[in-house]
Image (cartoon, grey):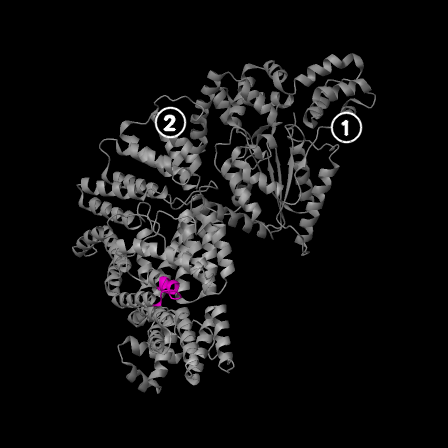
């Protein structure tokens, strides 16, 4: 007997509207392939309807038409029993194209994404310890599909039965389709709308938000069913007979076609006296009638069909035969019988195999299997698919249907599959399997490790469950010390993530006291310090700082634990306003052998803090190097969620501190967009919003800053974690820009009280005193001056020229009159020794304006010209406008910019920098370069801003900074 395909080519009745929509979409796609611009590239076309309404037939028509036009077709299909298999549908889409590549070609094609997406795509990963986050995997799959689309353009994706798609595939499709604009791609989907899972809300919104609603398929009319019937039995079929066919099928295209075929096979002519026979045949298409029909076949055939239903489509006949306990000859015979009964057909998937003629048939057979027998078949299936080399995930989904029995092998299989899902970026799938493994239950000695892995799977989904699992794990006896340290670290991380910073610090402190291993004890102390320092309501910061200082003094940085402590000491010295040499020295020792951002059980809080020590210490170029390396590490590992969001955002902050405002805004927006793709990435959002507000204010876009703050309730909600820049201080800047001095004064007074209690006195880290001085200046000028002077003293104690210059500038602003002129001049001098381009431009314009008001126009002109040039290069539009206004008021005209904006050093600048790095005084440098000392200072000021460092970091920065071209 010839093999029968699942869907035979038959006419589509009463689907003109749908076919017109399909043809229009294909025509658009064809135009795009020919270079014709089209609206809505990356279009999504959806067919919806209840079971049997002809969705699959429409997708078959789409395939035929696409292939006829030379388009590439990639297809996938959800399965009722395969919903537990993460990325099952994605694999169907992509694997055929990848399978055609040689191994080396495949690795070249995937490039750096290989290990990130390998497990999700069913490939063998090189780094089996790599666990990318879900966002990283989705980005990788986006890249793979985008590259395939470009290589094989134009492409049509056909996705059937999406109501049964695994949530991972559905989540990826939803995000990818929304971002596929511009690709020569058409996505055609089919699903039963009333059976979409709760997790499909975003998918629903995507489909209905495409400008055209889904095509909802209606039942066929009596006339259409009559035409289908008469095509098989002859035009002489009685009208009443055809009407009865319509009634028994309910207008379902699938049932009407199947009934018509069976009528034709039985030589029924459609006479009134054949109605009883017709009804019997109709009953056999689905439901009890189908099972009754199946029951007439041999026992082996019945079991073979049931095994296929348990395995899910498409299935391998040899595995079904093993489960059904029949031999290969019996399996071949069963296959032929089931084909003849229109139950099975040849699969059209990449792996071949067999499929049921319609999902309704598979569902009916599966649900007809008695529960004890079905459980046994799932158990046999788990063993059979594992023995066939299909991997632990294929076996584990069957174990989910088997009662718990204390089976160690079942636990091992579920655990292996869960680890694979974690490596695939599918934590929800891993969670299901580990929960089931815990119920089996595992051996007592494995319970703590299993709870640990279960907690890892829930961290991004339900951190409160992570806390529960890890607390339970800690109650287990005789835990391996390294495992216990990992449990405690993850517990503190989960507590912090759920805004329980105090509890996180307490857990680490208790573990540090109880630890007997010196290395573990030091690590727990580091964790305690981390969560204490980043806790907004820490009760006794000075005491903790003293304890940290005493501990750090005994350490030399021999191991990672010691270097983490020293890194924390550097950060603590920074926020307390100790001499920057202390903070920078600790940071350098901490980085002696590098610090990973992606250490599984370490977190990235300390490496990030160490990098920022350099930013606040007037060496932002060094901070940028560390952030660039850290972000690249995250991307290589597939960590493209909150880690990357914080990295992008704070990289923007470094750019802001350097005065590169356009780039700062770009990076902060990137960080915010990344954060918003990640569930629960609230701290990353706070970082991004604060930095964006500061940057927008610096650029003079106060209204945009207010809109952003209001949209995120930035001024209303106060986080329990330490965020930088400090949210209250940032919001006060917005209030000051809006002229709301009284509100800013109240807010900043509270900020000052809080930070003074913690002894965090560095104005470089939080300039609350400077902002409060501006807020007080209109009503309490004397107090404003005192605050500014105190900030200047604190900045001098810290020693960073940018902080000193900014504080002096504020003192000059609130002092006013002729007394301010020397302060302005000193502020400019300090800022010229720093990499802070925007603050220098502000001070220059302020000094120039003050000089102009005091009648010293020639000096004012020089300052204003310099300030205008700096403001333009920084992207500070409002500051540039102010400089132009001041020049105009002084009767002067702006001059053309004197130097181009570039990051490269001229030969003269390079030589001046090298001599300065060698410790040569300005007079010696001036003599060698034949410049005035003032000319050298201006030259070095350009160097500091371009290289991103002050004189102290110049020698090291020049080692890697590009030399000028000859």
Q: Label 1 belongs to which residue?
A: 224
How packed is label 1: few (under 14 Cα within 10 Å), some, or many (20 or more)? some
Residue depicted at 69% across the width and 52% down the height: 31
Q: Label 2 to label 1, Cα distance in Å?
A: 52 Å
Q: Is residue 431 magenta?
A: no
Describe residue 318's horizontal placement relative to residue 835 as left or right: right
Kindly indicate the quadrant of the structure image that contains residue 431: top left
Q: Label 2 belongs to which residue?
A: 410
Q: In the rendered structure, which segment of residues is drawn in magenta? A: 770-781
The vertical placement of 729 against 872, above or below, is above
Describe residue 85's horizontal placement relative to residue 340 as left or right: left
The C terminus sits in image quarter: bottom left
Nearer to us in this view, 108 or 919 = 919
The vertical placement of 830 against 748, above or below, is below
SS class of the residue under badge 2? helix
Nearer to us in this view, 773 or 528 = 773
The N terminus sits in image quarter: top right
Residue 707: % across, % down:
51, 55
Main SS of the magenta segment? Answer: helix
Kindly indicate the quadrant of the structure image that contains residue 217: top right
Which mark is nearer the camera, 2 or 1?
Answer: 1
Describe residue 789's horizontal placement relative to residue 352 as left or right: left
Residue 577: % across, % down:
26, 61
């Amino acid at each position: 007997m010839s093999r029968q395909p699942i869907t035979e080519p038959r006419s589509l009745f009463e689907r003109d509207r749908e076919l017109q929509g399909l043809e229009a979409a294909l025509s658009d796609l064809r135009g795009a392939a020919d270079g014709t611009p089209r609206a809505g590239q990356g279009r999504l076309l959806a067919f919806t309807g209840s079971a049997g309404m002809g969705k699959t037939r429409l997708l078959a028509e789409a395939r035929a038409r696409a292939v006829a036009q030379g388009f590439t077709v990639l297809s996938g299909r959800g399965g009722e029993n395969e919903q537990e298999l993460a990325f099952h549908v994605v694999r169907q889409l992509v694997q055929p194209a990848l399978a055609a590549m040689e191994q080396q070609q495949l690795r070249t094609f995937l490039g750096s994404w290989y290990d990130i997406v390998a497990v999700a795509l069913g490939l063998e990963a090189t780094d089996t310890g790599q666990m990318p986050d879900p966002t990283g995997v989705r980005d990788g799959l986006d890249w793979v599909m985008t590259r395939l689309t470009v290589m094989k353009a134009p492409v049509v994706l056909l996705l059937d039965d999406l109501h049964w798609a695994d949530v991972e595939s559905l989540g990826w499709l939803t995000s990818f389709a929304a971002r596929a604009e511009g690709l020569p791609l058409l996505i055609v989907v089919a699903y039963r709308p009333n059976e979409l899972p709760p997790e499909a809300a975003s998918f629903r919104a995507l489909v209905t938000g495409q400008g055209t609603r889904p095509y909802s398929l209606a039942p066929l009319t009596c006339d259409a069913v009559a035409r289908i019937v008469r095509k098989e039995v002859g035009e002489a079929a009685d009208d009443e007979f055809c009407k009865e066919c319509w009634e028994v099928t309910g207008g379902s295209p699938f049932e009407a076609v199947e009934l018509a075929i069976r009528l034709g096979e039985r030589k029924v002519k459609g006479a009134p006296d054949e109605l009883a026979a017709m009804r019997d045949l109709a009953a056999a298409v689905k439901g009890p009638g189908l099972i009754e029909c199946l029951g007439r076949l041999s026992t082996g055939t019945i079991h073979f069909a049931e095994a296929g239903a348990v395995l899910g489509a498409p299935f391998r006949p040899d595995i079904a035969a093993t489960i059904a306990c029949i031999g290969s000859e019996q399996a071949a015979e069963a296959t032929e019988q089931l084909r003849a009964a229109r139950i099975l057909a040849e699969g059209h998937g990449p792996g071949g195999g067999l499929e049921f003629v319609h999902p309704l048939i598979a569902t009916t057979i599966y649900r007809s299997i008695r529960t004890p027998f079905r459980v046994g078949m799932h158990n046999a299936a788990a063993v059979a698919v594992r023995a066939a080399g299909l991997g632990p995930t294929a076996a584990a989904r069957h174990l989910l249907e088997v009662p718990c029995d204390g089976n160690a092998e079942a636990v091992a299989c579920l655990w292996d599959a869960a680890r694979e899902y974690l490596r695939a970026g599918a934590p929800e799938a891993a969670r299901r399997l580990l929960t089931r493994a815990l119920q089996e239950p595992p051996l007592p000695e494995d319970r703590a490790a299993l709870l640990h892995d279960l907690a890892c799977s829930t961290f991004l989904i339900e951190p409160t469950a992570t806390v529960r699992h890890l607390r339970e794990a800690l109650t287990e006896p005789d835990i391996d010390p390294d495992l216990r340290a990992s449990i405690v670290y993850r517990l503190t991380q989960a507590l912090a993530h759920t805004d329980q910073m105090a509890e996180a610090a307490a857990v680490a402190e208790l573990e540090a006291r109880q630890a007997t291993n010196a290395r573990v004890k030091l690590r727990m102390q580091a964790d305690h310090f981390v969560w204490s320092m980043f806790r907004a309501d820490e009760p006794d910061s000075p005491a903790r700082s003293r304890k940290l200082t005493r501990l750090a003094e005994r350490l030399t940085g021999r191991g990672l634990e010691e270097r983490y402590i020293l890194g924390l000491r550097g950060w603590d010295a920074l926020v307390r306003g100790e001499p920057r040499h202390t903070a920078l020295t600790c940071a350098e020792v901490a980085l002696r052998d590098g610090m990973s951002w992606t250490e599984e059980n370490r977190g990235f809080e300390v490496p990030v803090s160490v990098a920022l020590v350099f930013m606040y210490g007037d060496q932002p170029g060094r901070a940028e190097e560390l952030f660039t390396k850290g972000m690249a590490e995250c991307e290589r590992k597939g960590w493209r969620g909150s880690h990357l969001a914080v990295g992008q955002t704070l990289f923007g902050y470094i750019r802001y501190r350097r005065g590169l405002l356009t780039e700062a805004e770009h990076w902060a927006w990137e960080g915010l967009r990344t954060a918003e793709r990640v569930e629960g990435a609230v701290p990353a959002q706070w970082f991004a919003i604060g930095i964006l507000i500061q940057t927008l204010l610096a650029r003079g876009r106060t209204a945009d800053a207010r809109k952003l703050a209001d949209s995120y309730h930035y001024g209303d909600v106060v986080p329990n974690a330490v965020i930088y820049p400090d949210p209250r201080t940032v919001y006060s800047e917005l209030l000051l820009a809006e002229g709301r001095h009284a509100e800013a004064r109240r807010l900043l007074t509270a900020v000052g009280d809080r930070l003074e209690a913690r002894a965090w006195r560095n104005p470089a880290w939080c300039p609350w005193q400077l902002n409060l001085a501006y807020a007080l200046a209109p009503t309490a000028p004397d107090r404003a001056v005192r605050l500014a002077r105190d900030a200047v003293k604190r900045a001098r104690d810290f020693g960073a020229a940018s902080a000193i210059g900014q504080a002096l500038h504020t003192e000059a602003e609130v002092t006013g009159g002729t007394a301010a002129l020397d302060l302005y001049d000193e502020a400019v001098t300090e800022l010229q020794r720093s990499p802070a381009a925007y603050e220098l431009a502000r001070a220059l314009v302020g000094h120039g304006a003050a000089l102009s008001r005091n009648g010293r126009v020639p000096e004012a002109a020089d300052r204003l010209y310099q300030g205008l040039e700096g403001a333009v290069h920084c992207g500070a539009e409002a500051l540039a406008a102010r400089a132009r206004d001041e020049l105009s008021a002084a009767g002067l005209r702006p001059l053309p910019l004197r130097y181009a904006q570039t990051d490269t050093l001229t030969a003269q600048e390079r030589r001046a920098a090298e001599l300065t790095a060698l410790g040569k005084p300005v007079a010696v440098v001036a003599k060698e370069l034949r410049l005035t000392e003032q000319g050298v200072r201006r030259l070095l000021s350009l160097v500091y801003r371009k290289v991103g460092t002050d004189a102290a970091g110049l020698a090291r920065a020049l080692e890697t900074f590009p030399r000028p071209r000859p």
